[in-house]
Amino acid sequence: MDKMPKWADVILIPLISVILALLVSGLVVLYIGESPVEAMQIMVRGAMGSAYGWGYTLFYATNFIFTGLAVAVAFHARMFNIGGEGQAALGGLGVAIVCLSVPWPHWSLALLVACGAAAIFGAAWAAIPAYLQAKRGSHIVITTIMFNFIASALLVYLLVNVFRVPGSMAPETARFADAVHLPNAADIAPWLGFRSSTPLNISFLLALLACFLVWMLIWRTRLGYEIRAFGHSETAAVYAGINPVRIIMIAMLISGGLAGLMATNSVMGEAERLVIDNVQGAGFVGIAVALMGRSHPVGVFLAAILFGVLYQGGAELEFEMPAVSREMIVVIQALVILFTGALDNMVRMPMEKLFLSLRRRDRADSPAE
Amino acid sequence: MDFLTILQILDSTVRLATPLLLACLAGLYSERAGIFDIGLEGKMLAAAFFSAAVAFTSGNVWVGLVAGIAASCVLSGIHGLASITFRGNQLISGVAINFLAAGMTVVIAQTWFQQGGRTPPLQGAARFQEITLPFADAMANVPIIGPIYSELISGHSILVYMALAIVPLTWWILFRTRFGLRLRAVGENPAAVDTAGISVMGARYAAVMICGVLCGLAGAYLATSLAAGFVKDMSAGRGFIALAALIFAKWRPWYALYACLLFGLLDAVGNRYQNIELVGVTIPVQFMQALPYILTVVILAGFVGKAIPPRAGGEPYVKER
C-alpha cells in the first residue's frame, strides 16, 4: 500500500508543488519585465529583514494560522469549509459587541470574553451550513459560499444602520476604549526593536496555542480520532458507531470558531474598531495555507508564515517595483492552491513511480532469500 | 410606479440577467457532465479583461470577443487538466482559478495600460452596440405594445439575443441529441458510459470547453456591452449568483432562464431604489443584494422542492483496471 516513504508525502511533494508555483510566478514577473530574483530579494528583505517587517509578517501570519486551522479541521472530516471569510467577519462582529458594550477594567478580561464571542459568532455562522449538510445533504461548499455573501451584506447593513457613529459618514463602529488595547510586540518585547505602531500583538501567542490545541484534538483525543475516521471513510465510521451528524456539526463548529477567532487579531489587536471588509481575504488564504500545510498544525504554522512573508513582502514589492502590482500576491496564492491542491497528482504520480522503481531496484540488488 | 418605470426596470432586468444566464448555462454543461465548477466567476473576469483589452487595441469588438473566449477556455483547460486528467479536487481547482483570474487580470492590465488595473474606456466599434429591431421606431407610438417592443425587446446588444437563443439550443442539445445524452450520462454514471465504449474523459473535456466558451461570452458582455471597458473585479460575484441560479433551476435550461431573470430583477430593483417600502416595512438594499444567496440556501435545504445535483458530480472517474 505504501508507495512512498512518509517524508516524501509530507515534505517532498508540498515542497515541489510550492517551488513549481513560485517558478510560474517568476515567469509572470519576467513577463512584466522585472527580474524575478530581484523581486524575491525585495520581498524577503521587506518581510524578514527588519523588526518592522517581522511585525507585519507575523501579524498577517496570525490571521492565516486561525483561518488555516479552520480549513484544516474541516478537511480532516473531509469537508471543504470555504466560508472562513464570512465566519471571520461574524467573529469580528462578536468582538466589536463585546468591546463596545462593556466598560472593561483590563484588556485580559476583555480578551477572554472577546475570544469566546468571536468563536461563538464564527461557529454560529458555520452552524447553519453544517446543519444543512448533516441533516439535509446540502453541499457544504455551496452553502458556505452563499453564507460568505450573506455575511458581507449583513455586516454592511449593521455597520451602516446600527453601529455607525452618529454624525459620521464612515460605515464603521466607534473606536474601542483604550482599556481593551491589546499589548503589542513593542509592549511585550521592546528589546527586539519593534516600534510602538507594530500590528503584531498578543493574539500571535493565542494562535500558537490554537495550533497546539488543534493538534491535541485531532491526534490525541477520541473526538479527533472520530473526525479523522469519518474523513477517511464515512461508511466505515458509521459502521463503527460514529454518528455522522454529530461529527459534521462538531467539526464545522470548531472550524467556524477558529475562523471567528481571527478577529481577536485583526479587529481587537489592530484596527480597534469594526470596519467593512475586516477579513480582507484571509479566509480564502486559509485554504491555501491548509492545503500547503497538509492540514497539520505544524504545516499550517509554517505555511501561514510563508503567506505572511508573501503579504508583507508583496506590500514592499509594490513600493519598490511599481510595475509589479499588489495583485501579484493573489496570483502567487492562486498558483499555490492550484499546484498543492488541485494539481497534487501531477507531482504525486511521477514521484510514486520514481519511488516504486527505486524500491524495485533495491529488491533486485539484495540477494534472494 | 407607472408603466414606463416598470418597462425601464424590466429592460435593465434583461441587461443584468444576460451575463448571469450565459454563466449559468456554462455551469449547466459542466455540472451536467459531472464537473463542478465554482470557477465561473474567474473565467468571466478573465474573459472580461481580455475582451476589453483586445477590443481596445484592435478597435474591433469581435476580435475582442474571440480573445475573451480564448482566455476563458485556457482557464477551462486548466480546470479540465486538474479535475479530469489529474483527478484533483474540482472545488479547489475552481477556487484557484478564481484567484488566478482576480490577480492576473489586474497584474496584466497594469503592465499593458498603466491605469491602475483597468483598460481605457472603449468607444465605437470596440463595443457591442445596441441593435434596433425592425419597425421599433415606427411602432414606438402604438399604445402598450409599442413601448414594450421598442423599449424592452428592441435595443439590446447582439449578445443578449444570443444568450436568449442559447437557452432552447442548450435544451435541444442536452435532451435531443446523442452528444447531450452522453454528456448527461457521464454526469450520472460514468462507469456505464465507459462500458458502452464511449470516452468519459472526452465527453467531460467537451463539456468543460463549452463551459469555457459560454463564460467567455458572459465576460465579454460585461466589459464590452454592459460596461465600456474593464475595471478590477468587475464580475463582482456574478459567477456565484450564476451558480446559485443553476442550483435554483435544478440544473435545467429553461428554469435557468427564469432563475436568472428573477435574480436580474432583484439586481435591477436594488439598483434603482435604495430602500423599498413594502406594506409599511422598509426593506434595506443589502437584503435585496443577499436575497439570491438566501433563496439558494433555502432551495438547497430542500424545504421548497429538493435540488439534487448530477449524481457523479465532483467525483473524478477512475477506470477500473
Image (cartoon, helix red, strand yellow):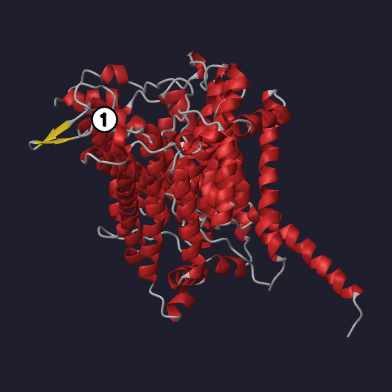
Q: Quadrant of the N terminus of chain A?
A: bottom right
Question: Quick one: which residue is furthest to the bottom in this view?
Answer: A369
Question: What type is the residue that disc 1 sits on?
Answer: Ala
Residue A169 to residue A143: above or below = above
Q: In the image, A340: left or right of A365? A: left
Residue B255 visible, this orientation: yes
Q: In the image, A369: left or right of B252? A: right
Per the image, the residue denoted by label 1 is A174
Residue B171's x, y, as percent?
A: 42, 50
Q: In the image, A324: left or right of B187? A: right
Residue B258 visible, this orientation: no
Residue pictured at 52% horizontal, 54% vertical: B35
Residue pictured at 65% horizontal, 59% vertical: A10
Give A349 or A69, whichever is nearer the viewer: A69
Question: Quick one: which residue is furthest to the left in this view?
Answer: B280
Question: Quick one: which residue is furthest to the front in this view?
Answer: A191
Residue pictured at 35% horizontal, 30% vertical: B15
Residue A146's x, y, as percent?
A: 36, 47
Helix, strand, or loop for circle 1?
loop
> Crowding at label 1, few (<14), some or many (≥20) Cα neighbours within 10 Å?
some
Q: How many marks?
A: 1
Residue pictured at 46% horizontal, 28% vertical: A196
